[in-house]
Amino acid sequence: MIEKDRFAEWKAPELEDGKLSKWNWMVQGAEGLKLGFKTDIGAFTYINATYGVIIEDEVQIGSHCSIYSVSTIDGKKGKVQLKKNCKIGCHSTVMPGVIIGENSIVGAHSMVTSDIPANVIAFGVPAKVIRKL
């Protein structure tokens, strides 16, 4: 498949709260999720949108990721925003209140605990900016 054709027939998924989607990812608090056009979410990703998750256009999220708008460990709550064309590597975790900037890339197995600016590569535990794009 040629990359430009990859999303030629993209349609927003039909989601049921707490149930796996057609592509085997799940959302709890589905009414709090705003999903942009041509998004790509990998299998076995979990999204808790109880306090809001905005995933803008053309965002890619790898498999086995976790995106939390609320943390049961420390009680933090806050809307998560994944800006246009950002990419989240597989097995990464995004914590409540975090904004990941437009075009930024978060490396695999990262723990994002604070905002990531636009146009950078960040990774690690916790994720830190490594360089500008």
Image (tube, rainbow, N blue to C red):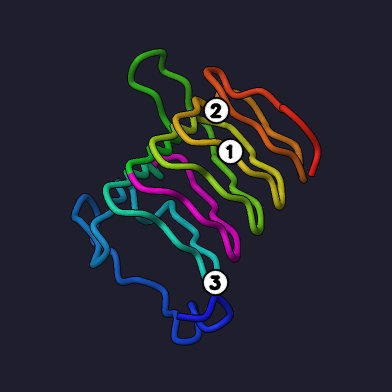
Residue 125: x percent and y percent? 52, 18
Instruction: Give the residues in magenta.
Output: 50-63
Indicate whether 62 appears above or below 38. Answer: above
Indicate whether 52 appears above or below 84. Answer: above
Q: Residue at x 58, y 80 (%)?
A: 4
Q: Earlier in the sequence, mark 1 or mark 3?
A: 3
- List the residue tagged with mark 1: 106
Indicate whether 124 appears above or below 102. Answer: above
How far apart are the two marked residues, 3 and 2, measured between alpha carbons? 24 Å
Q: Residue at x 55, y 36 (%)?
A: 107
Q: How many marks?
A: 3
Which quarter of the rendering shows the C terminus? top right
Residue 72: x percent and y percent? 33, 21
Q: Secondary structure at mark 3?
A: loop
The reply to whether dot 1 and dot 2 touch (C-beta < 8 Å) is yes
Residue 69: x percent and y percent? 45, 35
Classed neighbour count for the residue bearing mark 1: other residues with Cα under 10 Å, few (<14), some (14–19), many (≥20): many
Question: Which amino acid type corresponds to the residue marked 2 in the rendered image?
Answer: Val
Residue 84 lies in the magenta stretch: no
- List the residue tagged with mark 2: 112
Depth-wise, is mark 1 or mark 3 nearer the camera?
1
Q: Secondary structure at mark 1?
A: strand
Q: Earlier in the sequence, mark 1 or mark 2?
A: 1
Q: Secondary structure at mark 2?
A: strand
Classed neighbour count for the residue bearing mark 3: other residues with Cα under 10 Å, few (<14), some (14–19), many (≥20): some
Q: Nearer the viewer, residue 57 or 49?
A: 57
Question: Which amino acid type corresponds to the residue marked 3 in the rendered image?
Answer: Phe
Question: Which amino acid type corresponds to the residue marked 1 in the rendered image?
Answer: Val
- Checking the image for residue 37, the label placed there is 3
How far apart are the two marked residues, 1 and 3, measured between alpha carbons? 20 Å
